[in-house]
Image (tube, grey):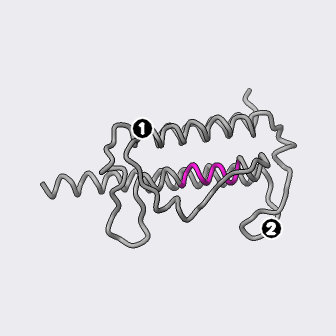
């Protein structure tokens, strides 16, 4: 029987692999395209933000590791090569396994103040919030890819 931490790792791995499936083989144009609607993001930016979120909540908050994160720049990031994003996702995976792979259910109940509002949240909450957030942005990424492909097909 898997531990609670192993179950969380499995869900995070699943979401990251789904992101990699969506971005696989994409061109720079597709990675950087974004809808004209306000407050939308490119696939490159969404993937960068996915990694930033995992790093902030799991690596930093749970793992007490120092990270260099500029959340605002995640949404303006651009790139030419999907392998950059795949490498970022793989590195995030490796650190996440190191940070939470050994935690017991008791450890997951550890609480400390969060950076968002100062309220104490548990490591479990931070991990579940990350899973939820990654799933939400995977949906955004998928819809952005579909809109990009639709736009490209209908402007030829």
Question: Tag on residue 120?
Answer: none
Q: Which quarter of the rendered picture does the C terminus lie within?
A: bottom left
- Most common secondary structure along the magenta stretch: helix
Q: Quadrant of residue 112?
A: bottom right
The location of residue 41, given as percent across then percent down, is 42, 61
Task: Write the residue at 44% across / 37% down.
Answer: 83
Say above or below: 151 vs 65: below
Tell me, yes or no, if residue 72 can be seen here.
yes
Task: Write the residue at 54% across / 50% down.
Answer: 135
Disc 2 crowd, CA 10 A, few/some/many (<14, 14-19, 20+): few
**Residue extent of the magenta highlight:** 49-58
**Magenta span has 55?**
yes
The location of residue 92, given as percent across then percent down, is 61, 41
Distance of label 2 from label 1 (alpha carbons): 36 Å
Q: Quadrant of residue 21?
A: top left
Q: Are marks 2 and 1 in contact (CB under 8 Å)?
A: no
Farthest residue in the left direction?
A: 156
Q: Secondary structure at mark 1?
A: helix
**Magenta span has 56?**
yes
Tell me, yes or no, if residue 11 can be seen here.
no
How many marks the image carries: the answer is 2
- Quickly name the residue at label 2: 119
The location of residue 136, given as percent across then percent down, is 52, 55
- Quickly name the residue at label 1: 21
Task: Write the residue at 65% across / 49% down.
Answer: 55
């Amino acid at each position: 029987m898997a531990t609670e931490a192993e179950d969380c790792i499995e869900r995070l791995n699943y979401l990251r692999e789904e992101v990699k499936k969506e971005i696989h083989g994409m061109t720079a144009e597709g990675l950087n395209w974004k809808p004209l609607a306000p407050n939308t993001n490119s696939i490159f930016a969404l993937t960068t933000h996915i990694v930033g979120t995992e790093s902030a909540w799991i690596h930093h908050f749970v793992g007490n590791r120092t990270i260099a994160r500029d959340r605002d720049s995640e949404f303006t990031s651009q790139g030419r090569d999907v392998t950059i994003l795949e490498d970022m996702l793989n590195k995030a995976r490796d650190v996440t396994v190191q940070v939470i792979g050994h935690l017991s259910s008791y450890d997951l109940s550890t609480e400390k103040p969060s950076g968002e509002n100062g309220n104490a949240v548990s490591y479990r909450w931070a991990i579940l919030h990350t899973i939820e957030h990654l799933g939400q942005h995977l949906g955004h990424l998928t819809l952005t890819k579909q809109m990009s492909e639709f736009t490209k097909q209908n402007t030829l």
